Image (cartoon, rainbow, N blue to C red):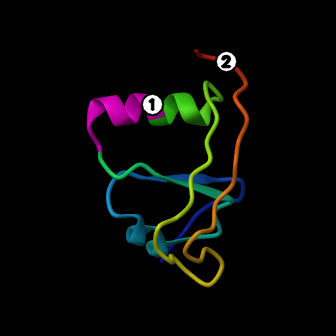
């Protein structure tokens, strides 16, 4: 397991099950693919360009079970 600092958001470009290898993150984004378009949209999401309502499709750990997730509001920072 890779320890991370508090208030860290982990972005997984690939299989969301790989989030299992990280611990102590406050939020995660399962972006599924590392193509440039997805990377651009993920960066915009993190900085508040648009809202998110995603849910994990698989269990990552006891703390992050299948279906866990959070909604964010658009801050209109980049859009």
Q: Which residues are magenta?
A: 34-41
Q: Which residue extends farthest bottom?
A: 62
Horizontal relation, residue 8 to residue 32: left or right: right
Q: Position of residue 24 (x, y in %)?
A: 65, 69
- Label 2, on which residue? 77
- Label 1, on which residue? 41
Q: Residue at x 59, y 77 (%)?
A: 65
Estimate how packed mark 2 is, as few (under 14), some (14 to 19) or many (20 or more) residues with alpha carbons within 10 Å.
Answer: few
Establish if 29 lies above or below 4.
Answer: above
Horizontal relation, residue 37 to residue 54: left or right: left
Q: Quadrant of residue 21?
A: bottom left
Element class at badge 1: helix
Q: Residue at x 70, y 48 (%)?
A: 71
Element class at badge 2: loop
- Is the C terminus in the top left, top right, bottom left or bottom right quadrant? top right
Towards the viewer: 24 or 30: 30
Q: Position of residue 38 (x, y in %)?
A: 36, 36
């Amino acid at each position: 397991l890779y320890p991370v600092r508090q208030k860290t958001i982990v972005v997984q470009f690939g299989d969301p099950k790989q989030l299992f290898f990280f611990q102590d993150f406050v939020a995660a984004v399962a972006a599924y693919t590392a193509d440039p378009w997805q990377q651009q949209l993920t960066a915009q999401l993190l900085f508040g360009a648009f809202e998110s309502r995603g849910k994990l499709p698989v269990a990552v750990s006891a703390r992050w079970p299948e279906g866990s997730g959070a909604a964010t509001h658009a801050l209109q920072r980049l859009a």
